[in-house]
Image (tube, helix red, strand yellow):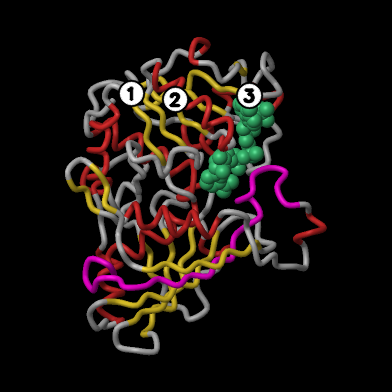
Amino acid sequence: MPARTYKVAVLGARGLVGQWFARMLSGHPWFKLTAVTSHEAVGAKYGKSVKWVIGGSVPAEFAELELVESDPKRIDADIVFSALPTEAARKLEPEFAREGFAVVSKAAAYRLDERVPLVVPEVNPDHLQLLEAQRGSWDGLLVADPNCTTTILALPLKPVADAYGVRRVVVTTLQAASGAGYPGVPSLDLIDNVIPYIAGEEEKVRDELLKIMGSLRGGRVEWAHFEVAATCTRVPVLDGHLESVYVETEKPVDPAEAVELMRRFRGRPQELKLPTAPEAPLVVLEGEDRPQPRLDRMAGSVPGMSVAVGRVRRGPSERSLMFVALGHNLVRGAAGSALLLAELLAAEGYV
Ligand SMILES: NC(=O)c1ccc[n+]([C@@H]2O[C@H](COP(=O)([O-])OP(=O)(O)OC[C@H]3O[C@@H](n4cnc5c(N)ncnc54)[C@H](OP(=O)(O)O)[C@@H]3O)[C@@H](O)[C@H]2O)c1
């Protein structure tokens, strides 16, 4: 456990992910939110200018923070959480890393960069060793948190891959409206409808999953070799991405054993008892009509930090498994996972 507390900043604090960061940082035992940034409301008080849409209200201790520009010279912090749009992140995140900040990014800009670890803390914490490759690039560090859909898929896939090996993953997603940020998809496009395409998402799921499930060799990540086919759709659900998953395995699968492996699955955050780590990263539900976004998106001992899994069953051959996974895109898929990653960095002595 770290012997100190850390000052943290949130870049893009008025956005949906930024709001969840503020909520989850309220009362955090190690991290103290000292700076929030904006593009369009620089100079305003956070509490007055944020359009708080995630339920509840702005944490009182952050309401008086003044929004500043996303400029390293305006910020006094050890860790910077980036909830910026991709293009802004591409420009700004290296500037923060060069100035010595530890940047934990929710944006897509550097996820596939060879020097940047792309980490789900329970799945591939060893990839943090890539940070060695960043020495010489800047004084700080830059770590990427995956796309929400990828994290929700990687967690249940990990125990299956370890036990049976993976040849192919076919996934169809039903993604919540809040996945597109605020204001997101126009309501008249989404209500009473399903949009069978999310630009760039299917490529992100494939590439990020292969990087996360890859192996560290000679200071580089060798991507995993299995095949991934994703179809990503947007549905009129507020929060919670549902994913229908088919996995073709190397070895025959016993579905009852797979359920047990998922239930027993634990990772480094659970060993270290990190503050945002749920007791179990996967919650396997018995009911044949579960998981459901409205009922199960806040699964876990830290609400929203576990992926709910259901309908675990054999596929068409003995070397296949099918299941449905559901995760809160803004908690386990965004602010919560980035917070867990920063806790891991602190506990392992990287910051
Ligand atoms: N929504 C999700 O479920 C989810 C999940 C995983 C990852 N992500 C990623 O997380 C990031 C944030 O997503 P979001 O859903 O929170 O988006 P959002 O609701 O659109 O918020 C983005 C925030 O970024 C700020 N911003 C915009 N342009 C900027 C610029 N040029 N410089 C500095 N700040 C700028 C805005 O600040 P002001 O409004 O104060 O001007 C805004 O509050 C994106 O990269 C997204 O892809 C989102």
How busy is the neighbourhood of tag 3: few (under 14 within 10 Å), some, or many (20 plus)? Answer: many
Q: Say if the magenta span includes residue 165.
A: yes
Q: Is mark 2 within 8 Å of ligand 1?
A: no
Task: Tell me the element at label 1.
Answer: loop
- Side of 182 relative to 166 (left or right): right
Mark found first going from the N terminus, 3 or 2: 3
Asked whether disc 3 touches disc 1, contact meaning CB atoms under 8 Å apart, the reply is no
Marking on residue 38: 3
- Residue 94's disc number: 2
Query: Which dot marks residue 105?
Result: none
Mark 1, residues whose alpha carbon is within 10 Å: few (<14), some, or many (≥20)?
A: few
Q: Is residue 282 something that shows in the picture?
A: yes
Q: Is residue 1 above or below residue 165?
A: above
Q: Residue 58: x and y, percent?
A: 62, 31
Element type at marker 2? helix
Q: Residue furthest left?
A: 218
Residue pictured at 26% horizontal, 52% vertical: 222
Give percent across and percent down for residue 269: 27, 45
Please provide percent x and percent y for residue 181: 64, 44
- x, y percentage for residue 78? 38, 20
Q: The residue under label 3 is which amino acid type?
A: Ser
Q: Is residue 122 magenta?
A: no
Q: Residue at x 48, y 49 (%)?
A: 147
Q: Is residue 14 visible?
A: no
- Disc 2 versus disc 1: distance between alpha carbons? 9 Å
Given residues 17 and 164, the one toward you in this image is 164
Query: What number is the disc on residue 137?
Result: 1
Instruction: Report if the CB atoms under discs 2 and 1 are less than 8 Å apart.
Output: yes
Looking at numbered disc 1 in the image, what kind of residue is underneath it? Answer: Ser
Above or below 105: residue 78: above
